[in-house]
Image: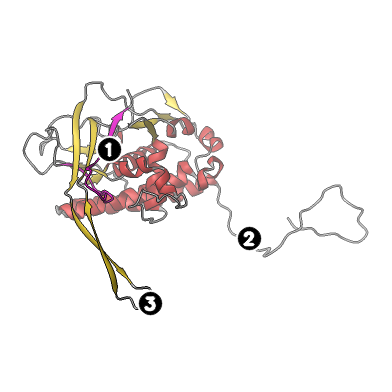
Amino acid sequence: MTENKREGVSESPIEFEKTRRSSVAGRYKDKRERIHEAMCDLKLAIDGIGIQLSQSENPDQFQQTSAAFARACSIFLRKMVLGNRDDPKTRLLDDEIAQSLNLRFERLRRISPNRIPLEIIWKLDGGDAQFTKLDDNTLQPEAVYSTRIAPSELKISIEWPLPGVADWTENPTWDKLWQVKAEELFDTHSNDTLSCNEWLGQQLVMFDNRGISLKDVIRTVVTYEGAHSTNVSRLLLTENEQDRTPANNPELHILNNIKICGIKYCHIIVIETALYLYKKLMKNKEIKNPVGEITLPIICTMPKSSEDVFSSAPNWLAYDGGIILSFGDRPQLISHRIRAVR
């Protein structure tokens, strides 16, 4: 509202803020309308992945499509439940809206204590390296230095299954494929429900001795892949280098490079969370659904090999990152452990 004083009118006890810029306003959209728009955006991605998966059996296209869909799902979740700069007031499903919609969230599924030990082993053979020092002015070779590259090995121990793939405990067949769906992650038949903050704060996995929450995984995918595209290949800092956010949370980025049948584990979590929330909103009579037929996709996959899929180091479980070279003769061994909360 702008200030407008008229002659002959006594001073009003109401004080108006001084204003700047244009007095022409945009169209107001309440949060329910913006929720509808976000659902329309995700519906387009849902329709797209449905077409892609039905028309192609190419493994590379399958991985490309699944990753693209995960990024779209992460944007949907950022708008709905994360908000801007992690401010809960800016999310579309803020406390007031969630309460008005009578919206509560089911817990993560509990994982059985009977788990299968699996390992990802990533090795880098040692070798030799030569560095040539160039003259600062002429750029001519000045000296040659030789050193050894130490052999390196990364071992990631996983207690299978993890949340999000709770029922992936039997050898899949063409009649019973492994499925990426909300019921693999959430206990959708439970009456024990949580608020949005409690739901996001649930511990998804333990990475060594650190708990990683559902919110941590969603935020990692949306921040570094969905809303932005950031290089997070280097998680190591030199002694005097200024701290960088990815290097401060290496566990999250290591977890985000674990692939199961070609799909990133964190992508599985984001897809299942987005589909769970989308389905819940569609059932809510207070929210306007997108126009058109809505069929939620179920992404199916299975290992390529017919061998026992639960051998100690299965080929369908992989690490998609790398290891920084270590110089010298001493072998570099890096090990991590990932498991569901007990």
Of residues 315 and 136, the one drawn nearer to the viewer in this rendering: 136
- Vertically, is 338 above or below 293? above
Q: Secondary structure at mark 1?
A: loop
Q: Secondary structure at mark 2?
A: loop
Residue farthest to the bottom, as pictured: 138
**Picture coordinates of residue 212, whole percent (x, y):** 38, 34
From the viewer's perspective, is 337 left or right of 174?
Answer: right
Q: Earlier in the sequence, mark 2 or mark 3?
A: 2
Q: What residue is disc 2 on? A: 25
Label 1 sits on what residue type? Lys
On the question of residue 75 being in view, the answer is no
Q: CA distance from mark 1 to mark 3?
A: 61 Å
Q: Which residue occupies 43% across, 34% down? A: 200
Tag 2: amino acid: Ala
> Going from the N terminus, do you reach mark 1 or mark 2 first?
2
Question: What residue would you read off at disc 3?
Answer: 137
From this viewpoint, is residue 198 visible?
A: yes
Question: Where are the magenta residues, as a range?
Answer: 316-340
